[in-house]
Image: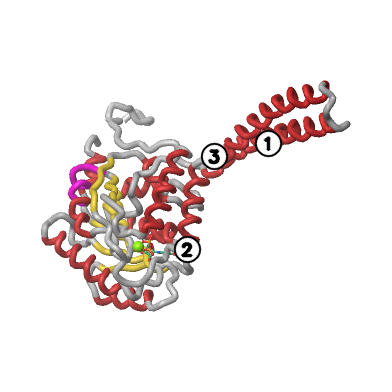
Amino acid sequence: MNNFEAEEKIGNCLSIVVPCYNEEEMLPTTVDVLTELIEKMIADGRISSNSFVLFVNDGSKDRTLPMLREYAKEREHVCFVTLSANRGHQSALIAGLMEAKKYADMMISIDADLQDDVNVIPDMVDKYIAGADIVYGVRSGRKTDSFFKRTTAQMFYKLLASMGVKTVYNHADFRLMSRRAVGALSEYREKNLYIRGIIPQLGFKTDEVSYERKARTAGESKYPFRKMLALALNGITSFSTKPLQMITSIGILVLVICFAAAVYAFISYFTNDVERGWTSLILSVWFLGGVQLLSLGVIGEYIGKIYAEVKNRPLYFIEDSDMSSAGSADGE
Ligand code: UDP
Ligand code: MG
């Protein structure tokens, strides 16, 4: 009984999960590199021989799917699932992890373009074997990104941090997760997925490996500015109700200004250099503005609470226990 958790982690079947959207140009290289890596790690005795690469076709419009069908047939260690339509990177990734969890003990997610360094995968596995449930791939720099992508990404991380969202700096979706960590992730049933924000909330023992991110070698980025912005907004609005709380603060600020304006208006009124009606008009404008913002803020507070309830996030995960001294109900 005591060894239950330990036993559960002994298995070392690895699944590398790769979301693919229109990756026909990249796929041949990706398949070669990843299967070779899997074979090498099996030979080293790091992972079990039933380990596999799981490609998730995210409703591609090019030849990705027929190619994957071929590879899955021809190659040992290659599997695929295909989604009925393009659902976006985060959903494709979740789909892959949930499928892989049925077979594998640990899962590594990586982009099809192999911009993330596959050479640190064995290190990730070693850290899993040493006991980590989550191993983050962390970029040591952003030299290969365009100036634009680099600065916008950094601004985004800073913004998230200021909104109180916990993220791992310079980490995207290149990570290893144990089956129980993926199981914990599956308890998050929200539809607005920002996986990077959820993982640090899971807890468990974590570790990281650092690597240099390369430039894309084939095909083009499937994350144009529009999608990056959507991901960023999703990250903020899924993890923070600060924007709602800001309304309350602005409301209070406006009411404070209203009192200052009142003092000014009365002084002007008694010194008699104002038009008739101006005093009451200007006071109403400030006062009503402040009251309205404050009321919106109050409603916002409740919406924030409703939002948290609706997301129905799990409250806790039990990582380990020793219940051997607890008597069972039938007195055994
Ligand atoms: N991707 C996906 N669905 C999409 C867009 C992208 O599955 O709708 C995959 C894509 O095939 C790649 C990964 O997500 O494996 C990351 O995309 P990309 O490399 O284009 O993003 P970038 O590295 O430019 O941020
Ligand atoms: Mg990429």
Is the CB of mark 2 within 8 Å of ligand 1?
yes
Q: Main secondary structure of the magenta part?
A: helix
Foreground label between 1 and 2: 1
Residue 87 has which mark? 2
In the figure, is residue 26 to the left or right of 120? right
Residue 224 x/y as whole percent: 45, 63
Q: Residue at x 35, y 30 (%)?
A: 328
Residue 293 has which mark? 1
What is the secondary structure assignment of the residue under circle 3?
loop
Kind of residue indicated by mark 1: Leu
Residue at mark 3 to residue at mark 1: CA–CA distance: 16 Å
In the figure, is residue 42 to the left or right of 249? left
Q: Residue at x 18, y 56 (%)?
A: 47
Quadrant of the rendered structure where residue 318 is?
top left
Quadrant of the rendered structure where residue 289 is?
top right
Identify the residue position indicated by label 3 in the image: 241
What is the secondary structure assignment of the residue under circle 2?
loop
Kind of residue indicated by mark 3: Thr
Is the CB of mark 1 within 8 Å of ligand 1?
no
- Of residue 16 and residue 7, the one placed in the foreground of this image is 16
Residue at mark 1 to residue at mark 2: CA–CA distance: 37 Å
Q: Residue at x 24, y 58 (%)?
A: 117
- Of residue 133 and residue 253, the one placed in the foreground of this image is 253
Mark 1 and mark 2 lie on one chain; the one further toward the N terminus is 2
